[in-house]
Amino acid sequence: MKRYDKMFNTYDVIVVGGGHAGSEAAAAAAKMGAKTILITMDMMKMAQMSCNPAMGGVAKGQIIREIDAIGGYSGIVSDRSAIQFRMLNRSKGPAMWSPRTQNDRVLFSTEWRSLLEQVENLDFWQDTVVDLIEKSGRITGVKTAMGITIHCKALILTSGTFMNGIIHIGEEQYKGGRIGDRASYGITEKLNSWGFHSGRMKTGTPPRIDGRSLNYSRMEEQKGDENPGKFSFWNTKPLKKQRSCWITYTNPGVHDELRTGFEFSPMFNGRIEGIGPRYCPSIEDKIDRFSDKDRHQIFVEPEGWNTVEMYINGFSTSLPKNVQLSAIRRIPGFENAKMFRPGYAIEYDFFPPLQIKKTLETKLIEGLFFSGQINGTTGYEEAASQGLIAGINAVLSTRGEAPFVLERNEAYIGVLIDDLVTKGTDEPYRMFTSRAEHRILLRQDNADERLFAHGLSFGLHSDERKATFEERSEFKKKACKVLDNESADPDTINSILVSKNTGTIKQKVKWSGIIRRPQIKIQDIIPLSDGLKKLSIERKDYQELLEQVEIEYKYEGYINREKEFAKRLKDLDSISIPVDFAYEEMKSMSSEAREKLKSIKPMSLGQASRISGVSPADISALLIKMGR
C-alpha cells in the first residue's frame, strides 16, 4: 500500500468530483498557480449534464455571465456547445432579461475536458474518494478506493448527487449517483463522525425519447433568437445556425394514466425520504398539487446536433416505466413515442449550509470546502458558481491571504451564498431574480463591469482579456460622449417620434434626452447620429454595448437610488462581528436570536440582520454591545 502513496506528492488543493462545481473549482485553483488535482470517478463525463441539456435561464443566465466575468469557464463552454440561444423575459425590464442556451450534451462535456487539460498546474486522477484525513482540526488529505492516500493543504468536496445515492423508478431501487454510475460511500459517515449534520434531498429527471418517433406537426415550434447572443464576454462566436425546440401540453387523459401509477410512486408511498425541488416538481407532483389544472406545458428539447434523442422538459417522474410510456403516448405529438430510457428520481446526502462560511469553507474543519449540491443547491449554474468561489478561496486559505466574499449588491453569486450560509435550506435551493434586492444593478449585461477586476486580481484573466475589457469600456465611454454632446434636429427626428407615439421636439435636444424616452430604442437613432453610426460600423461585435448604454440612460434614476440603498445596507455589512462573540451573554436578546447567532456565527452585522428570527431590536442590542 505504501508504495502507491509515493505516486503523489502533497497538493495545494484537492478537488473531489468532476461535475460543474468541481470543474470550475479545479480550473480556478490551478489558474491561480496552486498545485491542484481533480479526482473524479469518470473522466469521460467531466461536467456532465446529468439532467437538462441547457444552461442559463431566469437568474441562472446572470450567474453564468458572472462566472465568465470573474474568469470561469462555464460561459465559454456553453457558447461552444450551444445549439440554440434565447434571451428570456425580453417583454419585461432589463433587470429580468436572462440568457439561455440549449446545448449539445456530449460536446459540452468534451469542451470542458479540453479546457481543463490545457490548464497548467492541474493534474487528474480517476478514482473514488472513500475517506478524509484531518489533523488538529485541519484537513490534510484523502484516501481513495484504490488504496491511495493523497495529501493536501485544502480540499473541496463537490459530490453532487453521488453520496449514498439511491435511484428510484416505481418500486425499483438502485444504488447510484445517476443512471449508469455508481454511488459514493464513506464521506458522509466520516463527516458525521467529525460533528457535521447531514440530510437527504431528492431530485429527478424525465424520460428521454427517440425524436424520430415524434409528430412535430402537433406541437408548437420554438426557434432561437433571430440575432443570437452569447454568454461569454470574450472570444466565443454567436451561433450561425440553430436547432428548434418544441412545445406541447399534457391533458386529462395523460393525468388519468399517470394516476394509475401513484400507488407505486416512491414519492407518494414514503420510500423517498429526501425533499424535492419545490420549483421544479415531478409531473406526478404537479397533477397532485394542481388538480384543478387540466394541462401542463411540456418542452421537447434536442440533446445535440447529431442525435435524435429528445429531453422532455416538464415531465420529470419516478413512476413505473410502463406508466411513464403509456402516459407520455397520450401527449399530442407523442402518440407513437419510443423511449430511450425512463425518468427517475434520485436521493442523495447533503450538508445543511449553515455549517459553512461565506467563503464556502466549513466551520468545523479548516481547509475543507463544500461546493454545489452538497450545500443543498440544485442546478448546474448554482453549482458552477460555488465551485469558482471555493476554488479561489481554497487557494487564498493556503496562502494565508484575505478571503474573497461577494456581497449581495455585487452579484447573484453573492446572493446565492449569503442565502445559503445565513438562512440555510431544507429543500433544493434554486436561484430566482426575486431573491435579489438589487436586480437593476445585477443585470446580465453589466457582469463584466461588476466583476472583471476581481478575476484580474486573482490571475484568472489573460492580458488579451484585459485588453478586450479595456476596449469595451472605451467603446461605452465614446457612445456616452456622443449621446451627451450630439443633438437631435427636429426635422430629422420628429417623424421617428411620431411613429413611436411620443411627443415631437421644437428645437435641438441632446440624444441623451431622446434615448431616455421609453418608446425610443438606440437602434432607432443610430442611423440619425453621425457619432453612433461611426461607432456601430467600427465595432459591429460591440452592438450589445450600445443596448447597455441605452439601459443605463433610461434607468439612471432607478440605478442611482438602488446604489444608494445598497450603500446603506453595505454599512451594516462593513461592521464585523468577532467569531468568538459571546451571544449567550446578550440577555436583552430573544433566546431564538441568541441560539441562531451562536450557531451561524455571522461575519457581519448585515449578515446577522438577515437571519430568520433575529429582530431589529436584536441588531440594536448588538450595536450597543459592540460600542456602535
Image: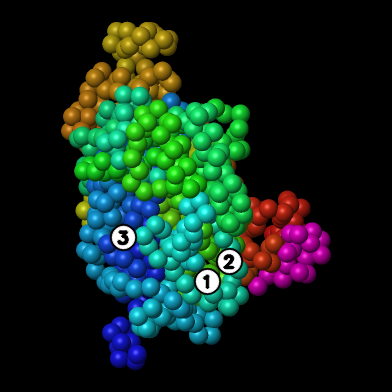
Callout 3: few (<14), some (14-19), or many (20+) C-alpha neighbours within 10 Å? many
Position in image of residue 430 (x %, y %): 51, 48
Q: Earlier in the sequence, mark 2 or mark 1?
A: 1
The image shows residue 615, relative to residue 323, as above or below, that is: below
Q: Which residue is mark 2?
A: 198
Q: How many numbered discs?
A: 3
Image quadrant assignment for residue 581: bottom right
Q: Amino acid at mark 1?
A: Thr
Q: Is residue 475 visible?
A: no
Task: Residue at 49%, 66% (x, y): give it.
Answer: 164
**Gap in Å between the C-alphas at discs 2 and 3?**
26 Å
- Inspect the magenta stretch and tell me whether residue 587 lies in it: yes
Q: Which residue is mark 3?
A: 46
**Gap in Å between the C-alphas at discs 2 and 1?**
7 Å
Q: Amino acid at mark 2?
A: Ser
Q: Earlier in the sequence, mark 3 or mark 1?
A: 3
The image shows residue 150, relative to residue 37, as above or below, that is: below
Mark 3 element type: loop
Task: Residue at 55%, 40% (x, y): give it.
Answer: 260
Q: Amino acid at mark 3?
A: Met
Position in image of residue 489 (x %, y %): 30, 13
Q: Report if the CB atoms under discs 2 and 1 are less than 8 Å apart.
A: yes
Q: Which residue is mark 1?
A: 188
Position in image of residue 608 (x %, y %): 65, 57
Residue interval drawn in magenta: 580-595
